[in-house]
Image (tube, grey):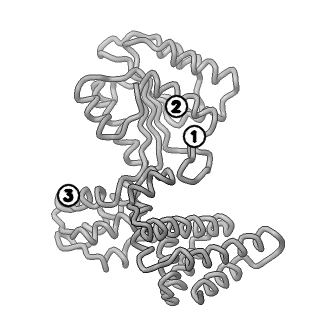
């Protein structure tokens, strides 16, 4: 059938067009869970679902379960949670594919992944699932339905935040809602948790941007964006505050440097695009971005900047990464020194 988004999945289910094979995954864990709930509701509820642990999957049991005829429901629905094809033996992977190929019209096999990264830790705009997981996903795209749940555009999330806050008897203006979305890096589960906390705190009142800054825990990517924006605008106090927050997260320094460099590259692309009259959509198309929120933020942070200034900062980051990998250095001191040098550009 196809790879779809959440809305298309909802429409598909409403129309009664259930697939025999489903695969739900992605970094937006709450959205993955919602997709699972939609299918389970469509088959009559959890009492009509057999749940299997994908990390300890008995494939012979799965084959037997898949052949059973439903007794009191229209479908024999089997949910396989966190099945990582990379951990299976070659013979097991072949058997799993055979099971998928032979699934009957009365059986639904539903794979959902929330406990491991299907990309194997790979990052970047053109990342792909690991080889063995990709084989499973590619087959289900052809024969069933796949939904990879990644963050939505900030503007769309902000609308959902406003609506959710209203249901809890609170008010949040759009700028504050967008700030919350960006602070949580557009992760739905994180946003919902933070919004629940904020609504409980204001108790029917107004959630402001200042309150979000004070109460919402900063995330790695969000803080990196704050750092790069402060560096480019030469706001030393804001930059060093972001450095302190990043170091407090105790992330591996090579990874942190790579994230900072990646963020600066995003801003450089946006700056070059702005200079040449290109749009957010142009950048997404030219560089293969799947989601707009990072590009939108980069366009905002690149305002008033030149590609040449950003390139100077990137050169400093490149030199720092070389030093980090070439010998024994104090990584913390190197990182702080690099930020200071960028502020002076």
Pick the front one: 228 or 302: 302
Cα–Cα gap, marks 2 and 3: 34 Å
Residue most extreme to the right: 327
Residue for point 37% across, 75% down: 215
Pick the front one: 249 or 127: 127
Q: Nearer the viewer, mark 1 or mark 3?
A: 1
Q: Which mark is residue 129?
A: 1
Residue 318 appears left or right of 109: right
Which quadrant: the C terminus? Answer: bottom right
Badge 1 vs badge 2, beta-carbon distance below 8 Å: yes
For disc 3, the neighbor class at 10 Å (few under 14, some 14 to 19, many from 20) is: some
Cα–Cα gap, marks 1 and 3: 34 Å
Where residue 202 sits: x, y (%)? 23, 73
Task: Relative to 88, say whether 329 is above or below.
Answer: below
Where residue 113 sits: x, y (%)? 49, 39
Query: Which one is earlier in the sequence, the residue at label 1 or at label 3?
Result: 1
Query: Which one is earlier in the sequence, the residue at label 2 or at label 3?
Result: 2
Q: Which mark is residue 163?
A: 3
Pick the front one: 229 or 302: 302
Badge 1 vs badge 3, beta-carbon distance below 8 Å: no
For disc 1, the neighbor class at 10 Å (few under 14, some 14 to 19, many from 20) is: some
Residue beneath disc 2: 137
For disc 2, the neighbor class at 10 Å (few under 14, some 14 to 19, many from 20) is: many
Mark 3: secondary structure:
helix
Task: Relative to 153, say whether 229 is above or below.
Answer: below
Residue 159 appears left or right of 148: left
Taking the image as drawn, is residue 55 in sight?
A: no
Mark 2: secondary structure:
helix
Pick the front one: 246 or 152: 152
Q: Nearer the viewer, mark 2 or mark 3?
A: 2
Cα–Cα gap, marks 1 and 2: 9 Å
């Amino acid at each position: 059938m196809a790879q779809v988004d959440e809305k298309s999945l909802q429409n598909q289910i409403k129309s009664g067009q259930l697939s025999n094979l489903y695969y739900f995954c992605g970094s937006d864990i709450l959205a993955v869970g919602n997709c699972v709930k939609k299918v389970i509701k469509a088959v009559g509820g959890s009492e009509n679902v057999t749940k299997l642990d994908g990390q300890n999957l008995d494939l012979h049991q799965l084959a037997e379960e898949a052949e059973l005829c439903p007794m009191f429901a229209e479908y024999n629905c089997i949910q396989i949670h966190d099945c990582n094809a990379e951990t299976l033996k070659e013979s097991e992977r072949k058997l799993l594919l055979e099971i998928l190929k032979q699934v009957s019209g009365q059986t639904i096999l539903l794979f959902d992944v929330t406990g491991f990264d299907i990309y194997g830790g790979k990052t970047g705009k053109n990342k792909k699932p690991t080889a063995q997981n990709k084989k499973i996903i590619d087959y289900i795209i052809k024969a069933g339905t796949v939904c990879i749940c990644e963050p939505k555009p900030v503007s769309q999330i902000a609308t959902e935040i406003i609506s959710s806050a209203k249901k809890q008897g609170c008010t949040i203006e759009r700028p504050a809602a967008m700030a919350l979305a960006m602070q949580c890096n557009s992760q739905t589960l994180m946003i919902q948790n933070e919004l629940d906390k904020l609504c409980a705190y204001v108790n029917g009142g107004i959630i402001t941007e200042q309150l979000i800054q004070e109460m919402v825990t900063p995330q790695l990517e969000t803080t990196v964006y704050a750092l790069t924006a402060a560096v480019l605008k030469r706001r030393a106090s804001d930059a060093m505050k972001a450095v302190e927050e990043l170091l407090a997260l105790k992330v591996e320094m090579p990874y942190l440097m790579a994230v900072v460099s990646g963020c600066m590259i995003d801003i450089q692309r946006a700056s070059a695009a702005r200079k040449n009259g290109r749009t957010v959509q142009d950048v997404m198309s030219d560089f293969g971005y799947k989601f707009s929120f990072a590009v939108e933020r980069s366009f905002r942070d690149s305002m008033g900047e030149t590609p040449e200034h950003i390139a100077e900062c990137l050169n400093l980051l490149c030199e720092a990464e070389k030093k980090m990998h070439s010998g024994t250095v104090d990584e913390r001191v190197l990182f702080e020194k690099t930020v200071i040098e960028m502020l002076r550009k």
